[in-house]
Image (spheres, rainbow, N blue to C red):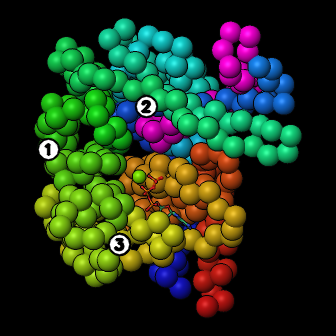
Amino acid sequence: MIWLDVLSRQRLQEILARYADQRIGVIGDLALDAYWYADMTRSLLSRETPHFPRPIVREAFSAGAGANVATNLKAAGAGQVTVFSVLGEDWRASILAGLLASSGVSVDHLIATPQRSTSAYIKPILQGFDSQQEDSRLDFENSAPLSPALEDELISAVEQQLPDLDSLLIADQMPMHGIVTSRVRDALNRFAARYRAIPFVVDSRHSIGLFQNMILKPNRMEALRAARPDRDPHAVPREDLAAIGMSLSAQWDRPAYITLGEEGVLVCAEGQPRYLPAAPVHPPLDVVGAGDAFIAALAASLAAGATPWETGAIANLAAAVVVEKLNQTGTASPDEILARFDRATASDSRL
Ligand SMILES: Nc1ncnc2c1ncn2[C@@H]1O[C@H](COP(=O)(O)OP(=O)(O)OP(=O)(O)O)[C@@H](O)[C@H]1O
Ligand SMILES: [Mg+2]
């Protein structure tokens, strides 16, 4: 009865109901995901070049990276969600800001500048008579670091809003030239030390070990990269991961969550590691966006006063909702999280 040990239905309802009072900031890399559908049955050989053009018959866009985390927070019922980032002045920025605004995310503190290119990942999907195939992705990324002036502008936007936030989530996603530069990270580390009552929650692909006084959410790979880069991530037993999680947690006296994909999460807090299995799911599965749903529920639950263990269980539930949503990044509403709790506890009691 591991779910009921950690989280009762009543507590879950109480915590979810408190999401509406939470004001949560998301600072980090935002991206636009685009899907361009080319109907190749309509393609006629070009007169100028020996190529078949790709007639785009449909396009679809979704919010990616930190923008998807913000969208998840709003879908989970967070009262106020504000994004802090730097975009270009281009068509991707307009579409992305429009998507965020239509989900209810505040874009008032986004910085737009011609010096930057708004990140986008475009997936061309070639459709034939009765099959389709994804072609090479087209990526828009930045080729230069964020300038010091833009770093300052971003840092001061966050600094001004922090006293009015109940949690700040950091989405440090880009391997190169993202907005969480070492100067931005240093500033966030200082803010986390200054505002100790506000949970700062970090998702960082490459630098989770460099954030201070924050709640860390690495996956298995990210935790090992930070703590034991010498070890093969696929060959590390859970007890060793727990020891790594405990040292990450002890360093800043904050909970650390090592997510384990289909196995769930290791919650390391208050001197005690605890393994919480993933919520049961039924195939077919689409794990894209699981990490984003997890961390959004994590930040909202901690802000709402949940214990570290309750938070781990709720984040597992939110991620499980998204994992069952196919062909979309997906979000989890409070009702869906509650329904997932009922399913998890029903299957738990059959064990
Ligand atoms: N197959 C699955 N079944 C059930 N839950 C899952 C599954 N895969 C992932 N999850 C849930 O999602 C959470 C996060 O997954 P994971 O550890 O893969 O994070 P991540 O690597 O950060 O994900 P992402 O690739 O989205 O960034 C897990 O802790 C678990 O709760
Ligand atoms: Mg992740």
User: Image check: 147 left or right of 35?
Assistant: left
Q: Quadrant of the C terminus?
A: bottom right
Residue 78 at what x, y percent from top left? 51, 41
Residue 46 at what x, y percent from top left? 73, 15
Q: Which residue is mark 2?
A: 30
Residue extent of the magenta highlight:
46-71
Question: Of marks 2 and 3, which one's residue comes earlier in the chain?
Answer: 2
The residue positioned 54% from the left and 35% from the top of the image is 137
Q: Which amino acid, by three-letter code, is at mark 1?
A: Ala
- Which secondary structure lies at badge 3? helix
Circle 2 Cα neighbour tier, 10 Å, few/some/many (<14 / 14–19 / ≥20): many
Q: Which mark is residue 234?
A: 3
Question: Of marks 1 and 3, which one's residue comes earlier in the chain?
Answer: 1
Residue 330 at what x, y percent from top left? 62, 47
Compared with residue 336, is residue 129 higher up or lower down, i.e. above or below?
Answer: above
Q: Is residue 188 shown in magenta?
A: no
- Which secondary structure lies at badge 2? strand
Residue 247 seen anywhere in this rendered image of the structure: yes
Q: Which residue is mark 1?
A: 193
